[in-house]
């Protein structure tokens, strides 16, 4: 008997996964389905204003471990979180006047702020007592953040060292058999797959670009 083809394995696996297409439903319904999956400890794939991401509850160590295993990523590398608004940032991080001014100017948008983490933040998503926080300029992400009621992870939906694919099917194909770890994928058209958010550190209250992405150095005023 011949071995099943890669395509047939993919089709057999994906039929057991929930695919929510925003074009076929409302953003609110899609967000509720995704929030319910994360609340149950599941991994989801979801669209942002830059790339597709992998979302889990960062307060769930088992779910985080599965994200690192899926991405083949060292666990010591931090994972950023998404919150719905600037006021929410201050629940999890110290937002200086300088950082607050950048947040007001560029958020919601493709900017990740690296800030001093508060003691209530799980150690698994911090690095040297700092945390990355995003507020994407994306209607689904903002609705998901409200529906979930707490932060969720903002890490690109790819294997470490690989480019993020432009749509959920290509993303799932990249993960191969490990895509079984993903319970739900929210589809909302193509994303660039190449340009992530710009990451700026405010740890010493002096803004420093850690990664130049969708917002350029010139736009930031550096």
Image (cartoon, rainbow, N blue to C red):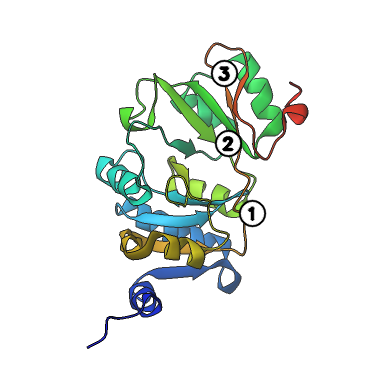
> x, y (%) of residue 217?
72, 28
**Which label is found at residue 7?**
none
Q: Quadrant of residue 210?
A: top right
**Regarding mark 2 in the picture, which secondary structure is present there?**
loop
Task: Please name whichever residue, 110 or 156, is drawn nearer the observer in this view of the structure.
Answer: 156
> x, y (%) of residue 168?
50, 63
Nearer the observer: mark 3 or 1; the answer is: 1
> x, y (%) of residue 123?
32, 27
Nearer the observer: mark 2 or 1; the answer is: 1
Identity of the residue drawn at 40% across and 69% down: 18
Compared with 150, 124 (above or below) is: above
**Regarding mark 3 in the picture, which secondary structure is present there?**
loop
Q: Residues within 10 Å of mark 2 (few under 14, many from 20)?
A: some
Task: Please name whichever residue, 20 or 72, is drawn nearer the observer in this view of the structure.
Answer: 72
Q: Are marks 2 and 1 in contact (CB under 8 Å)?
A: no
Identity of the residue drawn at 44% across and 40% down: 151
Q: On the image, numbered disc 3 is attached to which residue?
A: 202
Residues at marks 3 and 1, CA–CA distance in whole angstroms = 27 Å
In the picture, which quadrant includes the C terminus? top right
Q: Are marks 3 and 1 in contact (CB under 8 Å)?
A: no
Drawn side of residue 181 relative to residue 162, left or right: left
**Regarding mark 1 in the picture, which secondary structure is present there?**
loop
Q: Looking at the image, which residue sits at the far front?
A: 2
Drawn side of residue 193 relative to residue 147, left or right: right
Instruction: Give the mark nearer the N terminus: 3 vs 2.
Output: 2
Q: Quadrant of residue 61?
A: top left
**Which label is found at residue 192?**
1
Residues at marks 2 and 1, CA–CA distance in whole angstroms = 24 Å
Q: Quadrant of residue 10?
A: bottom left
Q: On the image, numbered disc 2 is attached to which residue?
A: 85
């Amino acid at each position: 008997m011949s071995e099943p083809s890669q395509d047939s394995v993919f089709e057999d696996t994906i039929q057991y996964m929930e695919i929510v297409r925003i074009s076929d439903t409302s953003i609110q319904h899609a967000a509720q389905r995704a929030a319910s999956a994360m609340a149950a400890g599941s991994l989801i794939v979801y669209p942002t204003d830059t790339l597709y991401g992998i979302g889990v509850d960062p307060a769930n160590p088992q779910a985080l471990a599965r994200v690192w295993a899926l991405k083949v990523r060292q666990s010591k590398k931090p994972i950023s979180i998404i919150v719905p608004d600037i006021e929410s940032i201050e629940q999890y991080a110290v937002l200086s006047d300088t950082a607050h001014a950048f947040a007001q100017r560029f958020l919601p948008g493709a900017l990740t702020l690296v800030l001093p983490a508060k003691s209530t933040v799980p150690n698994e998503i911090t690095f040297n007592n700092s945390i990355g926080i995003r507020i994407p300029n994306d209607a689904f992400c903002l609705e998901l953040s409200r529906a979930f009621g707490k932060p969720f992870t903002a890490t690109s939906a790819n294997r470490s060292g690989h480019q993020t694919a432009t749509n959920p099917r290509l993303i799932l194909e990249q993960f191969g058999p490990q895509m079984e770890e993903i319970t739900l994928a929210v589809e909302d058209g193509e994303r660039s797959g190449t340009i992530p958010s710009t990451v700026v550190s405010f740890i010493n209250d002096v803004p420093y670009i850690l990664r130049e992405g969708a917002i350029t150095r010139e736009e930031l005023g550096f």
